Image (tube, rainbow, N blue to C red):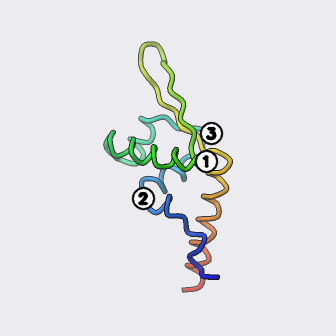
Amino acid sequence: MGLINNINKAFDHRIRLGMMSILMVNDYADFNMFKELLDVTDGNLASHAKALEKEDYIKVEKQFIGRKPNTRYSATPLGKQEFRKHIDALEKLIRKS
């Protein structure tokens, strides 16, 4: 079995990697928090969020706070499990080099 088998293509982009990293240590993050921490445009963030949501790795909740729309993201149990596998695979790869 190859070392890269558990490396997950869904996490191979720095923005998705960053989003999942943030969600591993926070119960949730909202759109603006991601934007600020990852320094990305609205459209870029939205498309990467959609990719993670499609895989069922994150859950998206839209709500209003006062009159302002607020989009909140949290990692699903599957997302956390798959991200841990991905990080473990990267660590093994690094140790082999």
Q: Nearer the viewer, mark 1 or mark 2?
A: 2
Say above or below: 80 vs 92.
Answer: above
Seen as rendered, the residue at the extreme top is 66
User: Which residue is denoted by mark 1 in the rendering?
Assistant: 25
Pick whichever of labels 1 and 2 is earlier in the sequence: 2
Residue displayed at 45% across by 38% down? 33
Left or right: 80 as drawn, with respect to 45: right
Residue of label 3: 27
Sequence-wise, the earlier of marks 3 and 2 is 2
Name the residue carrying label 2: 14
Choose between 51 and 66: the one closer to the eye.
Answer: 51
Secondary structure of the residue carrying tag 3 is loop
Residue that sits furthest to the bottom in the current view: 97
In which quadrant will I find the N terminus?
bottom right
x and y percentages locating residue 60 in the rendered image: 53, 35
Q: Position of residue 37 (x, y in %)?
A: 42, 45
| Residue ID at (51%, 48%) | 52
Distance, label 1 to label 3, CA atoms, is: 7 Å
What's the CA distance linking mark 3 and mark 2? 20 Å
Give the residue type at disc 3.
Asp
Return the x and y of residue 51 as percentages of the image width and height. 46, 49
The residue tagged with tag 2: helix, strand or loop?
helix
From what the image shows, is residue 73 above or below residue 57?
Answer: above
Where, by quadrant of the figure, is residue 7 drawn?
A: bottom right
The answer to whether 88 appears left or right of 66 in the picture is right
Q: Residue furthest front?
A: 54
Give the amino acid at mark 1: Val
- Distance (Cα) linking label 1 and label 2: 17 Å
Q: Amino acid at mark 2?
A: Arg
